Image (cartoon, rainbow, N blue to C red):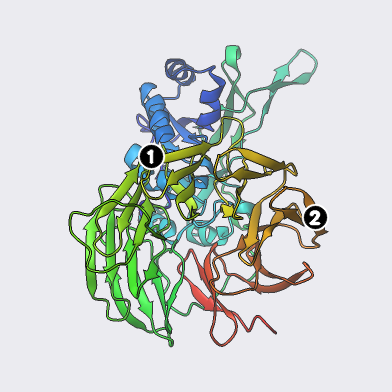
Amino acid sequence: MKKYLIIIALLLNGISNAQDFKFAVIKNLNELRASGSVSPDSLNKIISSGGFDSFVSTGNLTNRGTLTELDTAKKYLDSTKLTYSVLGGINEFSAGYPSMLNMDKFFEDDSFVKTAGDYLLIGVQSISLADCRRAHISLETLARLKSSLAGAGGKKIILLLNAETDAIDNFSSLKDLLAPYQVGLVITPEYFPKTVKTIIAGRRKRSVRINHYAPFIYGIELRNDSLFTYLYSGGNGFQASEGDVFEPVNMERLAGKGNGQETITSLIPSTVSSYSGLLPYKNNLIISSADGSVVSYNPDFSAKWKYRMSNSIASSPIISDSTLILASAGGDVILLDPVKRIEQQSIGIDCEITSELEIIHYKGDKELLIPKSTKSDKALLFGSAEGDIFCYDLETMQEYWNNSDSKSAPVKNIIDTGTMIVFKNGEGKIICIDSRSGQLIWRWGNKDTYADVATCLYFNGKQIISVTNKGTLVGIDFLLGVAEWQFDKNDVKDIYIAPENDKIILALGEGKLYQVNSNSGKLIRETRFRDKGIDSFITDINADPQLWLLSSGNQLYRLEKNYTLKKYAYAGPAPVVSIYPGSEGGIFILNSDGQLFKTEDAKK
């Protein structure tokens, strides 16, 4: 789908002869801007002085992936008055869906492919929205690339990637796609060196001088099929490395991570990405896809019914009082009968709904314009890409309140403590508001220390527990919004607190598991794992007491009672979106490629 993962084709204006092909590259615009050393006007002069009339911004545009930061980055790039194209970095993904949903609204040239003479310059986005820790190329990205390459025979391809080839879990799919074409250059984040060897010719010998540069601004030139790499060195301008012949790259030597188990037979048709969780209802499974389609599958995996939203879906559907609740990124909220697919209610909100949906018990005293016919106190809570939080009566779909104190969208889960709502936004701020009135109570996080946006929040009845941006843990008094303790191991990747034992935090470190007292932040026990690279907990298995862990290679592990790991199953060739226990043993796994499959009985 266009909005989610991006193919960027970079056509550089003014190039009519493929034998003299030049363009500049800016790595990590966010870091360059933060240095304060290069203004838009000076950047124009730097790039123009090297003979480059266009440039590519690749890597992080923002610090925390907020819409405000995207707007600032665009204004900076526009101020250079040069032609440019954009390939975003991991920061634009790590804050969740809002920034990537809006990339094409900020940058018009981020989703098409064009040629420049005999060359085709292509940028491929390869960070998954389902899991910002992994690099994955979506089905939609590959399909659009295939369509764009039609008729491109004979072109020499320059390929830009936003991740290393061995870090892209399905790089083999891209290799297969490009096999018929002549790929002469693959540019990855580590492609550019930090030094340049300058050959100095003397009367008797040739010597080599090593020049060191700040790794921000580079240039590439193809001249008579020879390749030159330039690095900008401040007062010395662009310095060129030795020329190399532009020869086809052996794509087979470029390896993706993979597990050697790339083939998974899906129980349902899988041609569209999915970023929403599995929703079981009675004996059916309800799955929503990135293109806006929602399907209820029978036990034999035939489609019972289909429903199409008018826009893409980022929020997982939920069921309350036998009513299926759907929300789209376009601002539509639909209430359906989950058995007959009959639409019960629908409203349109003037915002992009990107957060998870949450049902709370409304305890306020606001009188609604249209009287309720029941005594139900259930209300629907959701957030927008701009950071607004809305609370609607579930029966009549009238608004109780909205709050706009957050400047970026809610990410991960929303916690209901009874009379307060706590959530984390894309800036890493933890925000607490009154669930009766929507008024702000407190906000936690500062410039140096803020919440990690990729992990969930937890509540132990006294404190809000979060991983910080520094890989530590923090316990925040939920009444006052001040930190009561901090667990200073700085390698924490993810945490989990079991509902039946909220006094113990399980925290994943580098090859180890910490058990931490949730009231005091003190270490109880540390367990080392033989298996490395375990990144996250799988915490969305409703009513399943078994805890699962997932590695960066998509290997699923079972955490035993003695806190040892048992390798269980390969979780497929794409990031895991959701898993759910089967009624007859085994578990269902849904991945971001829209594949649904079932493992063997987990108890064996």
Query: Which of the pair 362/585 is nearer the observer?
Result: 362
- Name the residue: 76% across, 20% down: 206
Residue 85: where, in percent of width, then height?
Answer: 41, 36
- Name the residue: 56% across, 66% down: 573
Q: What secondary structure is marked by label 1?
A: loop
**In contact (CB < 8 Å): disc 2 and disc 1:** no
Residue 4: where, in percent of width, then height?
Answer: 40, 52
Residue 89: where, in percent of width, then height?
Answer: 52, 41
- Name the residue: 59% across, 40% down: 189
Query: Which of the pair 17/511 is nearer the observer?
Result: 511
Query: Which of the pair 399/226 is nearer the observer?
Result: 399
Number of residues whose C-alpha sits closer than 10 Å to that of mark 2, classed few (under 14), some (14–19) or many (20 or more): few
Number of residues whose C-alpha sits closer than 10 Å to that of mark 1, classed few (under 14), some (14–19) or many (20 or more): some
Q: What secondary structure is marked by label 2?
A: strand
Query: Which of the pair 437/491 is nearer the observer?
Result: 437
Mark closest to the chain's N terminus, 2 or 1: 1
The picture quadrant where one finds residue 232 is top right
> Considering the image in quadrants, where does the C terminus appear?
bottom right
Q: Which mark is residue 417?
A: none
**479 sits left or right of 421 in the view:** right
Residue 194: where, in percent of width, then height?
Answer: 67, 29
> Considering the image in quadrants, where does the N terminus appear?
bottom left
Count of all numbered marks drawn on residues in the image: 2
Residue ranking furthest to the left: 370
Above or below for 183 versus 208: below
Q: Which residue is mark 2?
A: 524
Tell me which amino acid carries mark 1: Gly
Q: Which residue is mark 1?
A: 117
The picture quadrant where one finds residue 140 is bottom left
Above or below for 504 versus 596: above
Tell me which amino acid carries mark 2: Ile
Q: Is residue 113 shown to the viewer in this render?
A: no
